[in-house]
Amino acid sequence: MIAQYSQLLGAIILVVSAVIGGILILAPGSIRLQRPECGWEGWTFNILNLLFFLLLIPLCGAMMLLDMHVPIFICIKLQSTPLIIVFESLGLVLFLFGSILLLWSRLSLRRSFRLAGVKPSQTDYLTLHGPYKNIRHPMYLSALMVLLGLTFILSSIVMAIMFIVMLWLIKRLIPREEIQLDQAYPIAYSEYCRRVPGSMFPTRQK
């Protein structure tokens, strides 16, 4: 039963990763050279994010579908069947919700999409619709949800460490990106921050 459930999860992960990968690559504004301007944190986050979405997620799905063991993930072997089901189900919910939020955010940005730490160009516009009506950085939140979901699904120590590293990088990147956005849209972005005070979680206006 557990093996069949894990294989089903693996198939779902593979399908979702194919959709995410296709949209991230083919969506308007994706195929262009972008240079992060906020130091090594931007480069590190972008490299890890690319590695995660285009390589690690499909590898996780294939590993579960084929019932393979990949040592690099350092997975904790849970002994309790109900605990395994709880962890994998919670992970699946986080993974799916994170994936939906990621796709919604990316499609809302259209040609204004930028890699982490990249300044807006003159042709970009401030996105105020979609998930951006409620939080200012939904793509960061979605990446963390997907990563945390896979951490629970695999019970992986490596994924847990990667989650902590990505969270730390995001916390450093957000203030720098908001300075860039405030410089690009000086009046509009200040008003946007007043109306949408939550950077990654919905927050009521004060």
Image: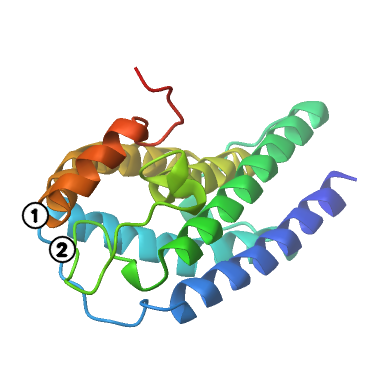
* Circle 1 SS class: loop
Within the image, what quadrant is residue 121 found in?
A: bottom left
Snapshot colouring: rainbow
Identify the residue shown where x is 42% and y is 25%. 203
Identify the residue shown where x is 75% and y is 64%. 11
* Quarter of the image that includes the C terminus: top left
For the residues bearing labels 2 and 1, Cβ distance under 8 angstroms: yes
Give the residue furthest to the top.
Answer: 206
Q: Which residue is mark 2?
A: 36
Q: Amino acid at mark 2?
A: Pro
Identify the residue shown where x is 17% and y is 51%. 41
* Circle 2 SS class: loop
Neighbours of disc 1 within 10 Å: few (<14), some (14-19), many (20+):
few
Q: Which residue is mark 1?
A: 39
**Residue 178 at least partly seen:** yes
Q: In the image shown, does 36 or 59 lie closer to the viewer? A: 36
Residue 146 percent coordinates (x, y): 53, 48
Vertical order, 29 against 114 (above or below): below
Residue 4 falls left or right of residue 190: right
Identify the residue shown where x is 47% and y is 71%. 24
Neighbours of disc 2 within 10 Å: few (<14), some (14-19), many (20+):
some
Alpha carbon distance from label 2 to label 1: 7 Å
Residue 153 falls left or right of residue 109: right
Q: In the image shown, does 201 or 25 lie closer to the viewer? A: 201
Q: Amino acid at mark 1?
A: Gly
Q: In the image shown, does 25 or 72 lie closer to the viewer? A: 25
Residue 86 percent coordinates (x, y): 75, 30
Vertical order, 123 against 144 (above or below): below
* Quarter of the image that includes the N terminus: top right
**Residue 168 at least partly seen:** no
Q: In the image shown, does 152 or 205 lie closer to the viewer? A: 205
Give the total of numbered labels: 2
